[in-house]
Image (cartoon, coloured by chain):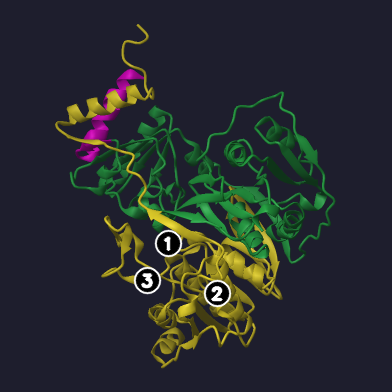
């Protein structure tokens, strides 16, 4: 049964393209997996007037780009896409199908997996293949990231997974890459039950925080709203953004959009400085991906120190004041 | 209007501890709670019932102890509770779970106008069950809803999605997943309190009552399975320093220089 399915497909999620690089990241990983399986990577691109993205995907590693370009597909719409893509999957039979775990990916892919009656894992943080069994090994966080589960889909195809943005590294732009472009004949049946009346860009802070190279996070231990303001100055000097834990937001030291953790944002900056945070699990799941973590807390036994590359036992306010004084001298 | 809210009983994750030898979660002594995101969905249902009247049914698939979560939901103000429980439901992934839930919801009388779910659970974290129930019942769905306006035969909802604030008109019956950000303080009306104290039975249904064969549900009805569960590798072997604030700040600055976040002093001389 598994031999009838071949190839790796990637859903082309092009919205917010310059900040949202997840399709390119999946292309790079897909190419690596395809090499091990001796097969090809196809990007599926659905939309209206989206050829620019076909070119981008070509330059970033796709072997094949499959395009369905039609006015009815102008806006992302899960029900319409599910019918269309399920039909394409039935016809072309990829063995693996990946999508970024964007809001849309996490809404669309489960519907598609259900329609195809196949397995789907969510928000993977690692992928690998077993070439003999042609199995996709999907590593996904469970219990808010406290544990990692290795999931496989042994008897159903395609093996589907959504992947956390920022996990894989995209390939460099290759302007001379050549690709095969397919334009399959499809029937498009827009779902009339759902109508997008208005769509407007939210404040770009969400995107800023998730892409910031440096993130400074404050928790309850910062003490007061005035002290919390120091984090903003620190972030500015270091070229970063400010995040907060739930207690700090409850105390109204920062807005809800700055929440980091299980019910807030996940950040993967080059440097994360976490101040006055004890290290509760629902917070730390949002910072696991940071390259370097510096933690400041006055309690030497605070769990946060188990997650830090550099831990400093001290009063948040005192350390921050002194740190800012030193940094201001250098600016 | 008739609303169904899907809930799941989960371990209280932030307070969970790991058995480091066996690489499993220690469930003993850890409280079970209604998945927090499901509470937000239940709040939304109570608010809608307050506006338009009708009934709220809470439904859950789980082991017999999930009845506690359903009782709690009834105390919050749900009108009716259904527990889908059966040994053959065990080991289900979201494909099998959504199949059981969809089957039960499809059998409800009266037919629901609206199904509300949380966006994801704090133990499995997938967020798949809402969309998959919608797909099986062939219902339109909007996820991450922060605002709901009722119209005749329709709903207009607002939701935040990949940095966009969308306003969407959706035909009833429909399924919505409710964003955590929608949490509103709940007002317990007199009617709510009365229903909390009335004696309600919880309807239990197993695979036979649902007309399902054992191989469509539970482990047999699943497509994915977990072959390994492990702790994330400890990447960080950090040193924890104590000392004067001056000393601590010097160490921070040293690290900032090392990471090239700031320039080393004397570089530009």
Residue with the mark numbered 3 = B33
The dot on residue B217 is 2
User: How busy is the neighbourhood of tag 2: few (under 14 within 10 Å), some, or many (20 plus)?
Assistant: many
Of callouts 2 and 3, which one flags the residue occurring earlier in the amino acid sequence?
3
Front position in the image: B151 or B63: B63
Is the C terminus of chain B in the top left, top right, bottom left or bottom right quadrant? Answer: top left
From this viewpoint, which residue is outermost toward the bottom? B199
Q: Could you tell me what secondary structure mostly forms the magenta stretch? A: helix
Tell me if I can see residue A127 in this picture.
yes
Residue with the mark numbered 1 = B122
CA gap, disc 2 to disc 3? 24 Å
User: How busy is the neighbourhood of tag 1: few (under 14 within 10 Å), some, or many (20 plus)?
Assistant: many
Decide whether residue A322 is among the magenta residues: yes
CA gap, disc 3 to disc 1? 10 Å
Q: Is residue B145 above or below residue A136?
A: below
The residue located at (51%, 79%) in the rendering is B59
Which corner quadrant of the image does residue B136 belong to?
bottom right
The dot on residue A195 is none
Tell me the chain of label 1. Answer: B
Is the N terminus of chain B in the top left, top right, bottom left or bottom right quadrant? Answer: bottom right
Front position in the image: B139 or A249: B139
CA gap, disc 2 to disc 1? 22 Å
Q: Which residues are magenta?
A: A310-331
Q: Which chain is green?
A: A
Q: Is residue B65 above or below residue A193?
A: below
Q: Relative to residue A32, is residue A83 drawn left or right?
A: right
Tell me if I can see residue B148 in this picture.
no
Say which element carries label 1: loop
Front position in the image: A285 or A213: A285
């Amino acid at each position: 049964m598994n031999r009838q399915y071949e190839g790796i497909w990637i859903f082309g999620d092009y919205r917010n393209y310059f900040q949202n690089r997840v399709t390119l990241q999946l292309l790079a990983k897909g190419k690596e997996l395809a090499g091990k399986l001796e097969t090809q990577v196809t990007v599926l691109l659905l939309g209206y007037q989206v050829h620019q993205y076909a070119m981008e995907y070509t330059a970033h590693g796709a072997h094949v780009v499959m395009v369905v370009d039609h006015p009815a597909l102008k806006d992302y719409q899960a029900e319409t896409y599910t019918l269309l893509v399920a039909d394409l999957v039935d016809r072309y039979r990829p063995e693996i199908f990946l999508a970024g775990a964007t809001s849309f990916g996490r809404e669309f892919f489960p519907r598609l997996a259900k329609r195809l009656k196949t397995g789907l894992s969510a928000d993977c943080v690692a992928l690998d293949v077993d070439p003999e069994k042609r199995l996709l090994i999907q590593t996904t966080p469970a219990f808010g990231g406290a544990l990692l589960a290795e999931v496989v889909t042994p008897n159903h195809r395609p093996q589907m997974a959504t992947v956390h943005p920022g996990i894989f590294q995209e390939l460099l732009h290759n302007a001379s890459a050549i690709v095969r472009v397919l334009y399959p004949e499809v029937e498009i049946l827009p779902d009339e039950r759902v109508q997008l009346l208005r769509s407007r860009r939210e404040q770009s802070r969400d995107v800023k925080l998730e892409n910031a190279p440096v993130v400074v996070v404050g928790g309850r231990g910062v003490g007061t709203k005035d002290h919390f303001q120091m984090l903003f100055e620190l972030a500015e000097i270091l070229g970063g953004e400010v995040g907060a834990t739930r207690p700090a937001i409850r105390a109204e030291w920062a807005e809800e959009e700055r929440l980091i953790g299980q019910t807030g944002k996940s950040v993967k900056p080059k440097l994360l400085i976490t101040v006055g945070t004890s290290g509760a699990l629902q917070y730390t799941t949002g910072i696991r991906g940071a390259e370097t973590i510096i933690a400041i807390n006055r309690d030497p036994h605070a769990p946060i120190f188990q997650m830090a590359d550099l831990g400093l036992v001290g009063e948040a306010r005192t350390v921050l004041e002194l740190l800012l004084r030193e940094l201001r001298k250098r600016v | 209007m008739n609303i169904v809210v899907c809930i799941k009983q989960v371990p209280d994750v932030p307070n969970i501890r790991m058995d480091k030898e066996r690489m499993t979660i220690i469930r003993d002594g850890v409280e079970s709670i209604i998945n927090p995101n499901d509470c937000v969905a239940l709040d939304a249902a109570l608010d809608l019932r307050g506006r338009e009247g009708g009934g709220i049914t809470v439904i859950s698939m789980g082991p017999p102890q999930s009845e506690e979560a359903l009782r709690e939901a009834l105390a919050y103000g749900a009108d009716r509770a259904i527990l889908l429980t059966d040994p053959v439901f065990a080991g289900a992934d979201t494909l099998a779970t959504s199949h059981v839930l969809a089957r039960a919801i499809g059998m409800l009388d009266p037919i629901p106008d609206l199904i509300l779910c949380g966006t994801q659970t704090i133990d499995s974290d997938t967020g798949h069950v809402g969309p998959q129930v919608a797909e099986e019942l062939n219902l339109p769905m909007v996820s991450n809803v922060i605002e709901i306006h009722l119209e005749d035969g329709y709903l207009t909802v607002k939701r935040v999605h990949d940095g966009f604030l969308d306003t969407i008109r959706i035909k009833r019956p429909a399924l919505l997943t409710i964003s955590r950000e929608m949490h509103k303080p709940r007002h317990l009306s007199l009617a709510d309190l009365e229903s909390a104290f009335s004696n309600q039975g919880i309807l239990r249904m197993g695979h036979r009552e649902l007309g399902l064969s054992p191989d469509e549900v539970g482990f047999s009805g699943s497509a994915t399975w977990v072959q390994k569960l492990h702790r994330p590798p400890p990447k960080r072997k950090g040193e924890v320093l104590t000392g004067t604030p001056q000393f601590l700040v010097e160490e921070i600055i040293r690290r900032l220089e090392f990471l090239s976040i700031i320039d080393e002093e004397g570089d530009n001389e």
